[in-house]
Amino acid sequence: IALSANASSSKSSSSSSSSDTLVFDPDAYTKLTKTVTDTAGTKHTVVYHFWKAITYVANPVDATYQSLIVSSPVEIDGKTVDASNAPILLANSVGGYLPSSVATATEVGGGGSAMGGGAAPSGAPSSSASASASASAAAPGANGNTNATGGATSSNQLLALAAGYVVIEPGARGRTLKNSGGEYYGTAPTAIVDLKAAVRYVKSNKGRIPGDVERIVSAGTSAGGALSSLLGASGDSPIYDKYLKELGAADASDAIFATGAWCPITDLEHADGAYEWNWGGNGLSTGRTVDQTVSKALQAQFAEYQAGLKLRGLGGFGPLNARNLDEYMVEQYLEPSATTYLAAVSDSARATYLKANTFITWSGGKATFTWADFLTHVGARKKDAPAFDAFDLSAGENNEFGTGTTLARHFTAYGAKNDSTGLSSKRVPSDIPAKLDLMNPMYHLVEKVNPNRSKHWWIRLGTKDSDTSLTVAANLAARLDNLGDDVNHIYYWDEGHGANTDPGDFITWIAQVTG
Ligand code: DHB
């Protein structure tokens, strides 16, 4: 790939290829120490080599975001470890489809989206991450980033490091980035293109970079979970080639081995319908009910979509459709989730919980209840209707599909038709369908089944997460299962957006699937 003259950095000459310039320097690390508390509460001292932000493309548009950090353990609790062939946790910290940077990170777990302004998702993660870290004297200060979704993922990073894995954390451009000409340069599909470029960088440095590049396990939460699942589904898909070429991405595969996704906010073009199918009867926290004409219209669209997917449910459930999906969600996910929760707590805590939640029948060590009662239990929905393609273009996803100097655009026919901002065409712009494909894991699993997708999937979602429909993750899991992939999907009972209550199990799962 020839670099254009103005794009060459100090490291590259204008005639060299990206593969020449994107060479990882094994010696350019600093040695740090981190104390990691595992899920059982035991503290571990991890000495690791840390590589500060490395730009992963030859032609960066904005190296602040198109950079990654690497952490590789060398000593755990006084014992020397060799991570040169260990699994690699590729943990993104994207939240809200916002820009995510590791440029100033000084230690493992140092990434995060700037959840400051605009339509950033609200809400801290539920408190459940059980790994905590106390920076040792070797790495004071870190970068102080405490964004919502970073919390869930950072426990993954720390536990992975303490388990002897290599942790690589890529930044990525995001939807709010605007250049001096007023152009948005981080909207779809840039975040996924950047993550793919990061994978290509890692794989092209096989033998130089620590870890086994054939055993990359991706992780991310919410928008980061969406991107993680997209990364897993879209490995080596040619539809990203022109974007990767433009960036001077390394000449290597971008397929990954396994995928972890927490509360993925994905399948965006169908998310409005799915949301109404799930939360349509729930009011907003203000007490207001959403427009039922809109809700019903979207539900009808979803029924058509769901039927078209021709999914079979996990656990031998049979064909799924919008009429039996409630039964499926209850049987396959929600009752087992409540059961796990209630079985784990003390007898008195269980009794108290059941007394306060009489919709649950507890019998023979199992929780049972109806979908309708479950919805009442969850209560207020988080988003208005439509949840993602807002008529007034106010949703974060409208910005994600912005382009040029246009901040926000519609990406569904229904949203465009009902536009309230004075758009003349009332149609979705012509470049949108291709961008939706570029952003949707389901495209790579349904429309164009990708043989190079990852085959091992860890998917998690809180039962009280109304940032999207609970069916989005379930449909993703069902499709993967129907394709023959190894799917580990459970719901966390009563947890909200961003929850990660079993990070230790995820680390164990990585050992199992990569072993
Ligand atoms: C996130 C949350 C949302 O509600 C959404 O629509 C997109 C992203 C997030 O937390 O990343």
Image: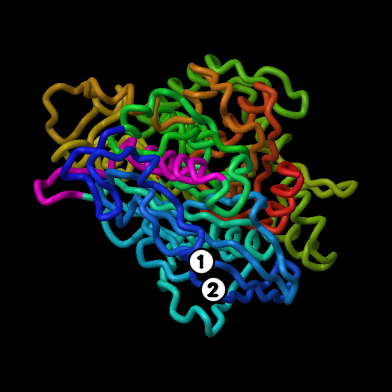
Q: Which residue lies furthest to the right in this view?
A: 364
Residue that carries the numbered disc 1 in the rendered image: 50
Q: How many labels does the image show?
A: 2
Q: Does the magenta stretch include residue 186?
A: yes
Q: Is residue 252 above or below residue 503?
A: above
Q: Is residue 387 visible?
A: no
Residue 59 in the image, given as x and y percentages of width and height = 27, 43
Residue 462, percent across and down? 59, 50
Q: What stretch is highlighted in magenta?
A: 178-206
Label 2: which secondary element: strand
- In the image, residue 52 sits, relative to residue 284, either above or below, namely below
Q: Which residue is drawn at 70% across and 74% down?
A: 44
Instruction: Left or right? Give the position of 16 relative to 466.
Output: left
Q: Which of marks 1 and 2 is nearer the N terminus?
A: 2
Which quadrant of the figure contains the C terminus? Answer: top right
Q: Mark 2 points at which residue?
A: 31
Q: Position of residue 258 (x, y in %)?
A: 62, 39
Q: What residue type is labelled 2?
A: Lys
Kind of residue indicated by mark 1 = Phe
Nearest the viewer among 386 and 319 is: 319
SS type, badge 1: strand
